[in-house]
Image: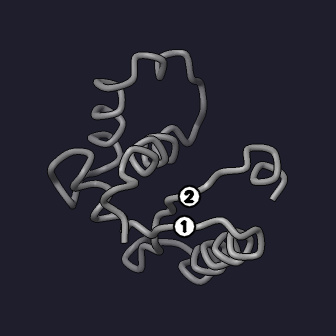
């Protein structure tokens, strides 16, 4: 919520819940709906893009794996080489979500 108040976005695009993912789907769904609630409470419009839609828009392949998403991001954003993080695949997803505003529901 702190980031929302600082950045004051007009619109957010968030990834929908991936029900086919391994791990704690209930936790992921809870987090997703918490983000939606915070956005609504702060009167910020949001759109949902499914993981498959995001992958298809990014790579042309709705079933793209993490490495393909990262490679697609690297081709478009040369600044990625300065980023050191364990979860770079999440950043790649976020990059394409941010560039998919017109495609989201």
- Using residue 20 as the reference point, say whether residue 55 is left or right of it: left
Residue at point 39% right, 44% down?
99
* Residue that carries the numbered disc 2 in the rendered image: 12
**Distance (Cα) linking label 1 and label 2:** 5 Å
- Using residue 103 as the reference point, say whether residue 26 is left or right of it: right
Nearer to us in this view, 20 or 103? 103
Q: Is residue 85 above or below residue 64?
A: above
Q: Are circles 1 and 2 on residues that touch, CB within 8 Å?
A: yes
Residue at point 48% right, 17% down?
79
Query: Horizontal and vertical percent for residue 92?
Result: 43, 41
Query: Horizontal and vertical percent for residue 14?
Result: 51, 62
The quadrant where residue 28 appears: bottom right
The quadrant where residue 37 appears: bottom right
Nearer to us in this view, 71 or 57? 57
Q: Which mark is residue 46?
A: 1
Say what secondary structure mark 1 lies in. Answer: strand
Query: Horizontal and vertical percent for residue 85?
Result: 60, 32
């Amino acid at each position: 919520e702190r980031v929302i108040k600082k950045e004051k976005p007009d619109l957010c695009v968030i990834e929908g819940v991936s029900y086919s993912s391994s791990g704690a789907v209930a936790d992921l769904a809870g987090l997703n709906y918490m983000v939606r609630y915070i956005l609504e409470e702060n009167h910020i419009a949001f759109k949902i893009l499914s993981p498959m839609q995001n992958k298809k828009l990014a790579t042309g392949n709705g079933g793209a794996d993490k490495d393909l998403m990262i490679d697609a991001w690297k081709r478009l954003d040369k600044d990625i080489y300065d980023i050191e993080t364990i979860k770079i695949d999440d950043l790649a997803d976020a990059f394409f979500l941010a560039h998919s505003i017109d495609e989201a529901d």
